[in-house]
Amino acid sequence: MSAVGGAVDAGAGGSVGVRRRLVVPGLLATLAATAVTTLAAAAGRAAGVELEVPADGEQIPLSGIAFVTGAFSVVGVVLAAAFNRWSARPVAGFVRTTVALTAVSLVPPFLVDAETGTALTLVGLHLLAAAVMIPVLTRRLGPAR
């Protein structure tokens, strides 16, 4: 950042630049991922998938799908901003981390002894959210330093 004529240049390295380049598109992608996964869950439910967790026998509400997708997508935006700020190779670090976290997120649906349709639908929802979020954030990360 440089001061020119009393004004501070908050370009690509400044907080305004990061906000415009990464955070705003990341939050818009969060809205898109939330909408897409909620619609996909509703379509699954309409097709007869129960989305029921065997431990308590209750269906996962669509609002729960939306909330969890939104919350973890925001975590992804924070991770991207952190890698962008503190990593010498933000793209490589972010992609490795998010792919690993996505892979880990695919396991729990099979551990709770859910019906096959429920487990596969939940896995699909996780992959769908990742497919929306990871490319959007990756394209907006800064170059390697």
Image (cartoon, grey):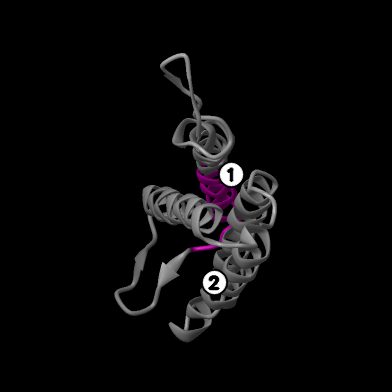
Label 2: few (<14), some (14–19) or many (≥20) C-alpha neighbours in 10 Å: few
Pick whichever, 53 or 8, lies toward us: 8
Main SS, magenta region, reads helix
Left or right, 120 with reference to 74? right
Nearest the eye: 27 or 51: 27
Q: Position of residue 109 (x, y in %)?
A: 50, 76
The residue depicted at 54 percent of the width and 77 percent of the height is: 104
- In the displayed structure, would residue 100 be above or below residue 65? below
The C terminus lies in quadrant: bottom right
Q: Position of residue 114 (x, y in %)?
A: 48, 78
First in sequence: mark 2 or mark 1? 1
Q: Identify which residue is drawn at 38% across, 50% down.
A: 67
Disc number for residue 64: none
Residue picked out by circle 2: 101
Viewer-proximal residue among 85 and 106: 85
**Residue under pointer 1:** 36
Q: Label 1 amino acid?
A: Val
- State the SS at label 1: helix
Asked whether residue 94 is drawn in magenta, I would say no
- Residue type, mark 2 in image: Leu
- Rendering coords of residue 79 (x, y %): 48, 58
Numbered disc 2: secondary structure: helix
Query: Which region is colored magenta?
Result: 33-50
- Marks 2 and 1 sit apart, C-alpha to C-alpha, by 20 Å
Q: How many marks?
A: 2
Of the residues tagged 2 and 1, which is closer to the observer?
A: 2
Residue 23 vertical placement versus 118 (above, below)? above
